[in-house]
Amino acid sequence: MELNEKFNWLFSKMGIENLYPPQKEAINKIMEGKSIIVSMPTASGKTLIAYSAIIRALHLGMKALYVVPLRALAMEKYDELSELLGNEYKVILSMGDYDSTSSELKKADVVVAVYEKIDSVLRHDPDYLYSIGVMVVDEIHMLQDEGRGPTLEMVLTRMKFIKNGAQLVALSATIKNYKEIADWLGADYVYSDFRPVQLRIGIYHDGILEFQDGDIEFIKEDKNRIGNLVRRSLENGGQVLIFVNRRSYAESLSEKLREITKLYKDNFEIPGSIDEEKNIYDEKIIENISHGVCFHHAGLSNTQRKYVEKLFKDRKIKCLVATPTLAAGVNLPARTVIVRDITRYSQDGSVQIPAFEIKQMLGRAGRPKYDQFGEGIIVSKKGYINIESILDLEDITSRLGNFTALRIHILGVVSSGIVNDEEDLVKFFQNTFLYYRGYSDLESLIRDTLSFLEDEELVTTFRGLRATKFGKLVSDLYLDPITGILFKNSLSQPYADIYSLYVISSAGEMVPLISREEDITFPDHPGFKDMNADAYKTALMLNDWANEEEINEIINKYGIGPGDLHMRVEIADWLLYSYSRIAYLLNSPNSLQIELLWKRIKYGIRTELLELVSLTGIGRVRARILYNHGYRTIEDIASSDPEKIAKIPGIGEKTSRSIVKEAKMIKMRKKNI
């Protein structure tokens, strides 16, 4: 198939009949082999541009890499690309296992990955980029993000430094200094404010809705302030997406809007529960969706979030109240977007949400193929405010210029072996956006950082600049050097599960629980001399998880949501694995116990269930059920009748047949060894 035919096939598969002018411009430049920065509004067709670049690379016999900031986005893009290309090309998703190599990635035609995963891979194998024909970077404005910005900048800097010749296609919603970013990357650019669905932006205040185009509507405020705004959209067959700045506000407003949304709801089958391990949010979600409304925030489990998102996409939920994290996540447009809160709470008190984030929220307004226009409405509680002042964008800047970011990434560069001395290292960092924007103290900051890393025995300058075994492992595990040092120093203490959990909860990578004014009594253990109450509370929560406390009990005890719990468990899984690897490297007598604790945290189980959870489809709940019914080993499962296991509550016929078959295969493999 010729390339033009492949493009036509792609357009047909995506339901595209005609290209928009900026899409034509971008695809023409891609066809010429140019790297480009694409700055276009949300829902203006950037995905088609990215997929066209991938099709071109595959047609030329090259591989493609698609990198995104968030796991939810990665899964969405993986699903789309698998559906488009899966019959002809191998598409894989890569997000975790930061210390894994690039061997699996090299077998794929298309790799979808998060920024951190690719940065980690390039530490192990800097030459991986030579196997790539095109790299698509989604959300390049994330350079501005304090957390992920330095990582993205390092991935792009590595690409510049090694000069692998790959095409770069970087996508963003509207950014102010797109020309500057394009110049830094040696790329062309396509800028457009075109949207296929017209966006009308307005301010709602004192019962008045004023649009930028001069239209004014008088909509009386109700007891919820915005209830009649919601009613106005639903009456015309639209959906409403509301952004608020707190989880509790999302839940309470969703509940208050039921009286309105129930008048417009569809009838559809509602399940008795959503998660396998039912939790407090199941009942709240089910009650809300039965009224045509729901809430969405990071406290929900992944299963719950996906369920709510699907119902909204399928137009079953008419109104969704969410925190701003949704704006940066999966694609969930609605005819009307209401930004109720334009401030958020921080350590410095209430601060205005940056213009770029508000634009991202408003950009969700207007569903292509469903709506002729979208409405983005900002709610003001202080009378009329000028829209332009709220939406005035600032330049995207570098977040690499601090000691924390530099110590992580300098160790990563040194450990990857692409520099031989301090002079090489400086040359590498002269390719960064930080240096491009005129950062003057780069050399002294590099020198100070190297001195720190050498003092802590993470790097050595003996016979050239290189990482020590300890430094290489810390880098491969994708840890902050400070965390590696913390783990190393803690190994001199006597072992205790709670102390190991306290150590990882003290690491900068962990998001600790807030202890507030609670009266916490620390254990009688020499390692607790620093008395970090937040870390200890987090350790207690993880300990409850590993001892098989029910999710609802943990949620209620610590005042968190299931999503909060699982997020911290995922981080603990990574940190405990890393802790055990460092312990083994340093020949610590605690190595085996830390490794065992890691496996228990991974699954949320006591030691006796470790064998059972190795079976596909058996998690902490089903493993305990099987164990309590006398099935305690793989051997027990393999020698049992599937019909008998199927009768156990919570197992079922499908799972029973599957695990018995798998257990027999494991037994046979062991016999043949």
Image (tube, rainbow, N blue to C red):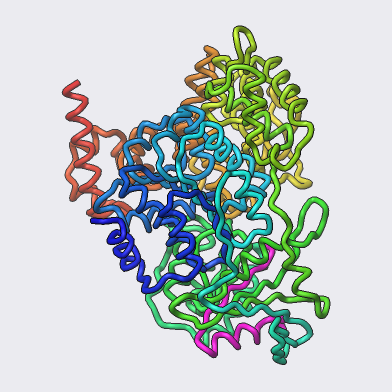
Q: Is residue 279 magenta?
A: no
Magenta stretch?
A: 223-246
Q: Residue furthest top?
A: 463
At 60% from the left edge and 70% from the top edge, which residue is drawn? 321
Q: Nearer the viewer, residue 638 or 218?
A: 218
Q: Is residue 395 visible from the viewing direction of this image?
A: yes
Q: Which of 646 and 560 is in front in this view?
A: 560
Q: In which quarter of the image is the N terminus?
A: bottom left
Res. 443 image quadrant: top right
Question: At which x and y percent is residue 292?
Answer: 50, 79
Question: At which x and y percent is residue 260?
Answer: 58, 85
At 30% from the left edge and 40% from the top edge, which residue is drawn? 615
Query: With 290 as the anchor, is 146 left or right in this view?
Result: right
Question: At which x and y percent is residue 505?
Answer: 63, 35
Q: Nearer the viewer, residue 309 or 278?
A: 309
Q: Is residue 239 magenta?
A: yes
Query: With 598 as the anchor, is 398 left or right in this view?
Result: right
